[in-house]
Image (cartoon, rainbow, N blue to C red):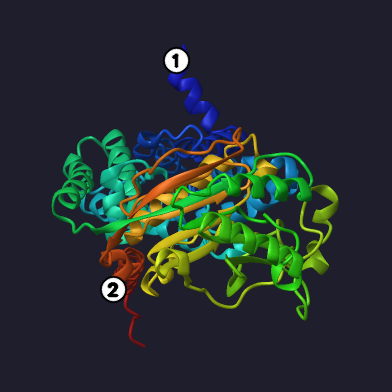
Amino acid sequence: MRTPLGDRASRLRSPWWRGLAAALCGALPALTFPAPSWWWLAYFALVPWLLLVRSAPTVRRAALDGWLGGAGFMLAVHHWLLPNLHVFILVLALLLGALWAPWGILVHALLADGRGRATGGRYAAALVLVPSGWLMVELVRSWEYLGGPWGLLGASQWQVPPALRLASLGGVWLLSLLIVAVNTAVAELIARPASWWPAVAGLLVPVLAGAAAWFWAPVPRPSGTVRIAVVQPGLGGTPTERLARSESLTRSLAGRGVRLVVWGESSLYEDPGDHPALAARLGTLSRQTGADLLINADARRAGRPGIEKSAVLIGPHGPTGDRYAKMRLVPFGEYIPARSLLGWATHVGRAATTDRIRGTHQVVMRVATADGLRIGPLVCFETAFPDMSRHLARDGAQVLVAQSSTSTFQDSWAPAQHASLAALRAAENWRPMVHATLTGISAVYGPRGEPVGERLGTDRSAAAVYDLPLAEGTSPYSRFGDWALYGAMGALLLAGAYAGVRALRRRPARAPR
């Protein structure tokens, strides 16, 4: 008589059922991100996937389980792109999922229960090497030409204060490392309870690290406040109607002591530097409110070969000369990689019909109406890259400002997930961050990643005022950078060298002639 457990085991021997199980296990961690935002699930979400890979009958099958699980994860995290890219998102998920194939081999080598392999020392090594391998996958897929670092596992902890404190020490990479270590320890306890001591140690280390960071890690020093405003015109209307609504909302801020007004991405489709009448209108708004305006133009510029997305600072007399052109563009959304080969993507989805051109360097702007406040602008997708915010903080930015638009994905998880990244970037660098959008969700966070004021949801057309807390000091992450990544690389290199030396020692000596 077959038991339900036996039925499931026999199904997993089928390559098709096993492949489906791997994809579903890989998709599970997507629930840790907004909109569900089940942050607590992150510490257990990888366990089914780890146990499945561990049980693979061969190394090749473990690699395939890693690949299909990675494809399931990428598809689930980016599922909101499906209406735009259609079948192409499946192709991208399979291509990027292949990055997890080596990770599957690593998991199988360290956790598999073959004869003589399940030792305490090997499990202890797994607690370091399995998270390190995961981090290498996150690093490679974070390359902007592969889609960028959307859905890094550590980013799921954006609303957990102890985790944000840890992020100020080692960035999102440290959070990912610790989360995967906890999952690995739980999988070890389930699979081999007899080898409990390394697993328990693996559970204790992240807990103790979080407690130590909460009680003893340095924190930013308060240095006053500045009053800023976010203008979110909302969905609907032509570009001309949206501009009129943005102007009306901005005028309502007059007399409220605002020093900087931030508009969302693509708030203008003409560059005020090339249109004197538009520049004069915006300058009048600045005089009426007593605040500089940070607008965003998605437009061609005179003397330039294509369309730029530029953050432009407007003062009482029009453009101040401070501007920043977006450097990291969204693949397929703002340009098509190798358009001569992949241009067909425009026929199966809403891919970019015209490639945007890239900016060349980051910029820190001074806001004259806020006593020279230094702001570091980012445009949309760029908030996902930890290095860009860190460079702005190191260059002297007191406030990080992101201009975004997710109107294409208005009813999906994308707006909430995008807004959550600002909390992490603020905590990493001890700099408050303003996330301003055209259609929501707009949100503001203080220098520890704490929420400030109200969030403007996707159903709002409003202007919101925030008393933004400023901070002094340099966070450990801003100062020392991606040390967690380098540590993971070092651990893998040492393990590889050790395995190579052992293999050479085991090679039988040649018989003398």
Query: Which of the 4 image quadrants contains residue 241?
Result: top right
Left/right of residue 457 with respect to residue 223 in the rendered view: right
Between the residue at mark 2 and the residue at mark 1, the CA separation in whole angstroms equals: 46 Å
Q: Residue at x 22, y 42 (%)?
A: 203
The kind of residue on which mark 1 rests is: Thr
| Percent position of residue 441, x then y | 55, 41
- Nearer to us in this view, 486 or 232: 232
Q: Secondary structure at mark 1?
A: loop
Left/right of residue 65 with respect to residue 504 in the rendered view: right
- Residue 67 in sight: no
Residue to which mark 1 is pinned: 3
Residue to which mark 2 is pinned: 505
User: Are the residues at dot 2 and dot 1 in contact (C-beta closer than 8 Å)?
Assistant: no
Left/right of residue 280 with respect to residue 127 in the rendered view: right
Q: Residue at x 46, y 47 (%)?
A: 256
- Nearer to us in this view, 430 or 466: 466
- Nearer to us in this view, 360 or 403: 403
Considering only order in the chain, which callout, 1 or 2, is on the residue closer to the N terminus? 1
Q: Which residue ends up furthest to the bottom in the rendered image?
A: 513
| Percent position of residue 247, x then y | 65, 50
